[in-house]
Image (tube, grey):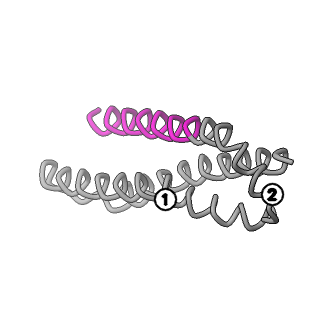
Amino acid sequence: MTIFVSAFLGLAFLLTTGSILYFKQMAEAEEEKESYTTLRKIGFSTSDIMKGIYAKQLFSFGVPLIIGLLHSFFAVKSGWFLFGSEFEAPLMIIMSLYILMYAVFAILSIQYYKKVVKGSL
Protein backbone atom coordinates (compact mmCIF):
# COMPACT_ATOMS: atom_id res chain seq x y z
CA MET A 1 0.00 0.00 0.00
CA THR A 2 2.82 2.39 0.86
CA ILE A 3 4.57 1.73 -2.43
CA PHE A 4 1.34 2.35 -4.38
CA VAL A 5 0.67 5.64 -2.59
CA SER A 6 4.27 6.75 -3.05
CA ALA A 7 4.22 5.86 -6.74
CA PHE A 8 0.90 7.65 -7.27
CA LEU A 9 2.09 10.80 -5.50
CA GLY A 10 5.36 10.69 -7.42
CA LEU A 11 3.55 10.38 -10.74
CA ALA A 12 1.20 13.23 -9.84
CA PHE A 13 4.18 15.39 -8.85
CA LEU A 14 5.99 14.49 -12.06
CA LEU A 15 3.03 15.41 -14.26
CA THR A 16 2.50 18.63 -12.35
CA THR A 17 6.11 19.80 -12.57
CA GLY A 18 6.39 18.77 -16.22
CA SER A 19 3.20 20.65 -17.08
CA ILE A 20 4.32 23.74 -15.21
CA LEU A 21 7.66 23.73 -17.05
CA TYR A 22 5.91 23.20 -20.39
CA PHE A 23 3.44 26.05 -19.91
CA LYS A 24 6.23 28.30 -18.65
CA GLN A 25 8.18 27.58 -21.83
CA MET A 26 5.11 28.31 -23.94
CA ALA A 27 4.70 31.69 -22.24
CA GLU A 28 8.38 32.49 -22.73
CA ALA A 29 8.14 31.58 -26.43
CA GLU A 30 5.30 34.04 -26.89
CA GLU A 31 7.21 36.74 -25.01
CA GLU A 32 10.31 36.20 -27.16
CA LYS A 33 8.45 36.22 -30.49
CA GLU A 34 9.61 39.78 -31.28
CA SER A 35 13.21 38.80 -30.56
CA TYR A 36 12.95 35.95 -33.05
CA THR A 37 11.52 38.33 -35.63
CA THR A 38 14.49 40.66 -35.10
CA LEU A 39 16.97 37.80 -35.31
CA ARG A 40 15.38 36.55 -38.54
CA LYS A 41 15.54 40.07 -40.04
CA ILE A 42 19.26 40.41 -39.34
CA GLY A 43 20.03 37.12 -41.05
CA PHE A 44 19.75 34.28 -38.57
CA SER A 45 18.20 31.14 -40.01
CA THR A 46 15.59 29.05 -38.27
CA SER A 47 18.18 26.36 -37.58
CA ASP A 48 20.51 28.90 -35.94
CA ILE A 49 17.75 30.08 -33.64
CA MET A 50 16.67 26.51 -32.89
CA LYS A 51 20.20 25.59 -31.77
CA GLY A 52 19.90 28.15 -29.00
CA ILE A 53 16.42 26.92 -28.14
CA TYR A 54 17.67 23.32 -27.89
CA ALA A 55 20.32 24.43 -25.40
CA LYS A 56 17.74 26.39 -23.43
CA GLN A 57 15.37 23.40 -23.32
CA LEU A 58 18.19 21.09 -22.29
CA PHE A 59 18.89 23.36 -19.33
CA SER A 60 15.21 24.01 -18.51
CA PHE A 61 14.24 20.35 -18.49
CA GLY A 62 17.63 18.75 -17.78
CA VAL A 63 18.34 20.31 -14.40
CA PRO A 64 14.97 19.35 -12.86
CA LEU A 65 15.32 15.89 -14.42
CA ILE A 66 18.72 15.31 -12.85
CA ILE A 67 17.52 16.56 -9.46
CA GLY A 68 14.43 14.35 -9.71
CA LEU A 69 16.48 11.30 -10.66
CA LEU A 70 18.83 11.86 -7.74
CA HIS A 71 15.85 12.29 -5.43
CA SER A 72 14.30 9.06 -6.72
CA PHE A 73 17.55 7.19 -6.27
CA PHE A 74 18.03 8.30 -2.68
CA ALA A 75 14.33 7.80 -1.85
CA VAL A 76 14.48 4.21 -3.09
CA LYS A 77 17.76 3.67 -1.24
CA SER A 78 16.05 4.77 1.98
CA GLY A 79 13.16 2.42 1.13
CA TRP A 80 15.66 -0.42 0.85
CA PHE A 81 16.82 0.41 4.35
CA LEU A 82 13.28 0.70 5.79
CA PHE A 83 11.74 -2.35 4.11
CA GLY A 84 14.82 -4.54 4.23
CA SER A 85 14.78 -5.55 0.57
CA GLU A 86 16.15 -4.13 -2.64
CA PHE A 87 13.97 -2.57 -5.33
CA GLU A 88 16.31 -2.39 -8.32
CA ALA A 89 13.67 -3.20 -10.93
CA PRO A 90 11.16 -0.60 -9.63
CA LEU A 91 13.97 1.95 -9.44
CA MET A 92 14.89 1.43 -13.08
CA ILE A 93 11.25 1.48 -14.15
CA ILE A 94 10.51 4.70 -12.27
CA MET A 95 13.66 6.41 -13.51
CA SER A 96 12.86 5.36 -17.09
CA LEU A 97 9.32 6.70 -16.78
CA TYR A 98 10.66 9.91 -15.28
CA ILE A 99 13.06 10.41 -18.19
CA LEU A 100 10.35 9.52 -20.72
CA MET A 101 7.82 11.97 -19.25
CA TYR A 102 10.30 14.84 -19.15
CA ALA A 103 11.41 14.01 -22.71
CA VAL A 104 7.79 14.20 -23.88
CA PHE A 105 7.34 17.61 -22.26
CA ALA A 106 10.65 18.83 -23.70
CA ILE A 107 9.73 17.63 -27.21
CA LEU A 108 6.32 19.31 -26.99
CA SER A 109 8.01 22.51 -25.86
CA ILE A 110 10.51 22.39 -28.72
CA GLN A 111 7.71 21.82 -31.22
CA TYR A 112 5.90 24.87 -29.87
CA TYR A 113 9.10 26.93 -30.15
CA LYS A 114 9.52 25.79 -33.77
CA LYS A 115 6.01 26.97 -34.55
CA VAL A 116 6.69 30.35 -32.91
CA VAL A 117 10.06 30.79 -34.68
CA LYS A 118 8.62 29.88 -38.09
CA GLY A 119 5.71 32.25 -37.54
CA SER A 120 8.00 35.07 -36.43
CA LEU A 121 8.55 36.43 -39.96
Residue range in magenta is 1-24
Residue 15 magenta: yes
Tell me the element at label 1: helix
Q: Which residue is mark 1?
A: 59
Q: Amino acid at mark 1?
A: Phe
**Would residue 112 be found to the left or right of residue 24 on screen?**
right
- Label number found at residue 14: none
What is the quadrant of residue 14 in the picture? top left
Where is residue 43 drawn, in percent x and y? 82, 65
Q: Residues within 10 Å of mark 1 (few under 14, many from 20)?
A: few
Which of the two discs, 2 and 1, sits closer to the camera?
2
Q: Which residue is mark 2?
A: 40
Please name whichever residue, 93 or 85, is drawn nearer the observer in this view of the structure: 93
Residue furthest out toward the front? 42
Where is residue 20 drawn, in percent x and y? 50, 35
Please name whichever residue, 26 or 14, is drawn nearer the observer in this view of the structure: 26
**Would residue 12 be found to the left or right of residue 3 on screen?**
right
| Quadrant holding the N terminus | top left
Identify the main secondary structure in magenta: helix
